[in-house]
Amino acid sequence: MAKKKDYIPRRIEQLLPYHDNLKTQTAALVGQAGIVTGDISESATDNADLHAKDADVNTADATKQAKVATRQVSITTIIAHVRAFAGRVKAHPAYTTAIGQQLGIIGDEDTTDLTNAKPTLTVKGAAVQGDVKIDFNKSISDGAIIESKRGNETTFTFLAIDTEPHYQDTRMNLAPGPETRQYRARYLLHDAPIGNWSDILTVTVPA
């Protein structure tokens, strides 16, 4: 069965209309699939709080950082409440897919296919000996196998398995002077390589 995307948006410009709809549909479906009047009041309270905090963020430039932090508390609260609400509704014997779609608590199908995909490698910041930062796009993979060759090496050799979308190469140059390094990566999924090798990223590390 295909993996579903998370049904709760993270970006505020998407979360606000999403929760507006959830509030409206919760009221419309009260009495169905275990939805009770308390759900209506919780949703309304959360919704009003988030709208108020978002308005504060948009109008108070001087205190934006603090307002964003307080808004994040509202976002975290909403996500926790929506997940608990959705879990309870979905577990109810009267729950139907139609109700889930109406409430917006079913994620879209994730059609990402890594079979023929390849990571994109980029170097972050200025490369120096002992500190070459390589970023890659993780997509839906568990991480990436990273290989490298440098100096006069003619073949790629294993460098690391990284489960985070960045890798720090801490090696010093093989010889005095600048060194040319090449990197490539391939996705990992369930501990097995998948997809194609990335395009080669070439980095010159100064002396």
Image (spheres, grey):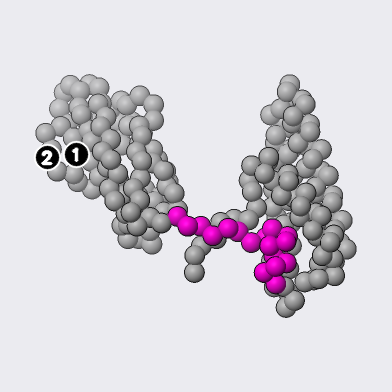
Tell me the residue at 71%/49% (across/down): 18
Question: Residue 33, relative to residue 125: is it above or below?
Answer: below
Q: Is residue 158 visible?
A: yes
| Tags 2 and 1 touching, CB below 8 Å | yes
What amino acid does circle 1 point to?
Lys
Q: Regarding mark 2 in the picture, which secondary structure is present there?
A: loop
Tell me the residue at 36%/34% (across/down): 122
What amino acid does circle 2 point to?
Thr
Between the C-alphas of marks 2 and 1, the distance is 7 Å
Q: Which mark is residue 149?
A: 1
Disc 2 crowd rating (10 Å Cα; few below 14, some 14-19, many 20+) is few
Tell me the residue at 68%/40% (across/down): 13
Residue 20 appears at what percent x and percent y?
78, 49
Q: Which residue is mark 2?
A: 154
Query: Is 34 contained in the magenta span?
Result: no
* Residue 36, image quadrant: bottom right
* Residue 137, image quadrant: top left
Name the N-terminal-most of marks 2 and 1: 1
Tell which of 52 and 160 is nearer to you.
52
User: Bounds of the magenta span?
Assistant: 96-112
Q: Which mark is residue 188?
A: none
- Name the quadrant of the C terminus: top left
Tell me the residue at 78%/37% (across/down): 53
Whether residue 8 sits left or right of residue 157 in the image: it is right
Tell which of 76 and 14 is nearer to you.
14
